[in-house]
Amino acid sequence: MHPFRFLTAMLLAAAGICLALPAAAQSAHFACDRACLAKIADSYFAALAAHDPSKLPLAPNVKYTETGVVKKLGQGLWTTAAGLPRYRLNLYDPETGGIGIHAVLPERGIETMVSLRLKVENKLITEVEAMVIAGDSPIVGHQPEDLTQPPRSWARTIPVSERNSRFEILAAADAYFRGFETNGTPQYIAAPLLPETDRRENGILYTNTRIGSSVVGTARSGFDAGNFKGMQVRDRRYPVVDMETGAVMSLVRFGDPMGKLSPASLPMDRNGKPQKAPDVLVGAAFVSEIFLVSQGKIADINAFWIPSEGNLPTPWPTGTVPTRDW
């Protein structure tokens, strides 16, 4: 192992980050290449539209959660989904059997946004983690109609010689949250963002654009101004890293579940008008952010999020990143 990689692995282990199986054993354990993972993802949405999880290659002990709540596979969105997604942003991680998707699909006569994570082991689905933002949700701003097709940069295949390492991609994502937590303080460390980096939240573009009569700045300008001072990031996880496209899915919670509740930040719509929603009090929010990383810099951000009802903690293990000897 290269000395730097050995040192990195030791630091990750010291931080509570687990090392996975040796390369040969891991390859057999996650014997599902990119095409295989894509086929399983397609079959998941087909089964969801048919309200029939028995159509899926499920492990006997498969675990399913929906917006932070453990459920039986077949409950929740499985009873209300009304068709296949019209929009999908896909991440495939053959090294760890991970699938990460942001999708927009029909449900109860409306369009609903879904963050989906699947874990595949021995070609069987062992974990399903969904976060659902209904198109009529009264507690968060959303514009699923603005999600039409992912930019071409998300679907590119980066030449192997130009790819960031898995650790470099993970480092860029984690540095984003470090900037989020330290902004507005003397300890502030800027996130590795490009000037042209765009950020969408629940379909709404919040960077390098105009909202109503206001011009919205860069993805970094809000951090530099300390606009998010005091916010905390909990339960950080980076379960899916797509080496081919340079993208990583992060699943976190914003806010402090032990702290004081505060009014939810309800975004403006594309015309600069406040979105119609009641005044909700939240202490935490479930967040699924997908970062596109290029040359160690975050080039694009797509975020789905929704307040956590009752300040629920994540039902998934935290502090683990499956790794191998790259």
Image (cartoon, rainbow, N blue to C red):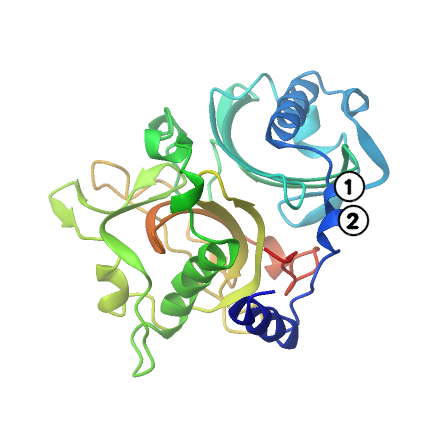
What residue did someone put label 2 on?
A: 25
What x and y, as percent, mark residue 127? 73, 42
Few, some or many residues within 10 Å of mark 1 (<14, 14–19, 20+): few
- The N terminus appears in which quarter of the rendering? bottom right
Q: Verify CB contact (< 8 Å) between mark 2 and mark 1.
A: yes
Q: Which mark is residue 177?
A: none
Few, some or many residues within 10 Å of mark 2 (<14, 14–19, 20+): few
**Residue type for callout 2:** Ala
- Of 15 and 263, nearer the camera is 15
Q: Residue furthest front?
A: 2
- Of 268 and 38, nearer the camera is 38
Q: Is residue 156 left or right of residue 282?
A: left
What x and y, as percent, mark residue 109? 52, 18
Q: Residue furthest left?
A: 213
Query: Where on the picture, by quarter, is residue 100?
Result: top right
Q: Residue furthest bottom?
A: 186
- The C terminus appears in which quarter of the rendering? bottom right
What x and y, as percent, mark residue 66? 66, 42
What residue did someone put label 1 on?
A: 28
- What residue is rendered at 39% in x and 32% in y? 156
Between the residue at mark 2 and the residue at mark 1, the CA separation in whole angstroms equals 5 Å
User: Is 212 located above or below residue 74 in the figure?
Assistant: below
Q: Secondary structure at mark 1?
A: helix
